[in-house]
Amino acid sequence: MICIAVFIPFFLEFIALFCSVLGSAICVFLPLAAYWALKLKKLRSMKDINWHPVYVEMVKHTGLTIFGLVLLFVGTYNSVNDLSKAMRENTKAFWDHS
């Protein structure tokens, strides 16, 4: 990781952007997708389905999805702003000493 950090200018800003994109995907969207894949597989095998609890779960998970999308957009927006600010304020060339 240190070798990569030496050769990538603005390493911390790049990692912040990377984490803001992957953080919401790994923590919000993948668990929801896995849950619904397993839930739909179970529902297809059932004969008599009570849909009311399923609808309540859909509403809750729609709220979580909207929350994840807000996190994704706000985090990515802030990370891109920080990266562009760091690039504007940098007056040194890539190989100059710090």
Image (cartoon, rainbow, N blue to C red):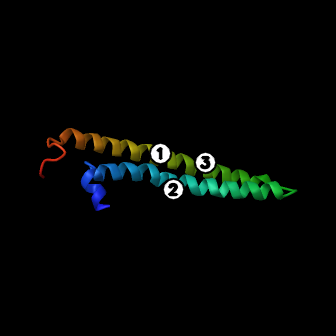
Residue type at mark 2 is Ile
Which residue shows up at 34% across the image and 46% down it?
79
Which residue shows up at 61% across the image and 48% down it?
62
Which residue shows up at 28% across the image and 56% down it?
5
**Of residues 93 and 45, the one drawn nearer to the viewer in this rendering:** 93
Q: Which residue is mark 1?
A: 70
> SS class of the residue under badge 2?
helix
Of labels 1 and 3, earlier in sequence is: 3
Q: Position of residue 67 (x, y in %)?
A: 51, 49
Q: Position of residue 41 (x, y in %)?
A: 76, 56
Of labels 2 and 3, earlier in sequence is: 2
Relative side of 92 to 23, left or right? left
Between tags 2 and 3, which lies in front?
2
Q: Which residue is mark 3?
A: 62
> SS class of the residue under badge 3?
helix
Q: Which residue is mark 2?
A: 26
Residue type at mark 1 is Val
* Residue 3 quadrant: bottom left
Crowding near the residue tagged with mark 1, few <14, some 14–19, many ≥20 C-alpha atoms within 10 Å: few
**Of residues 18 and 79, the one drawn nearer to the viewer in this rendering:** 18
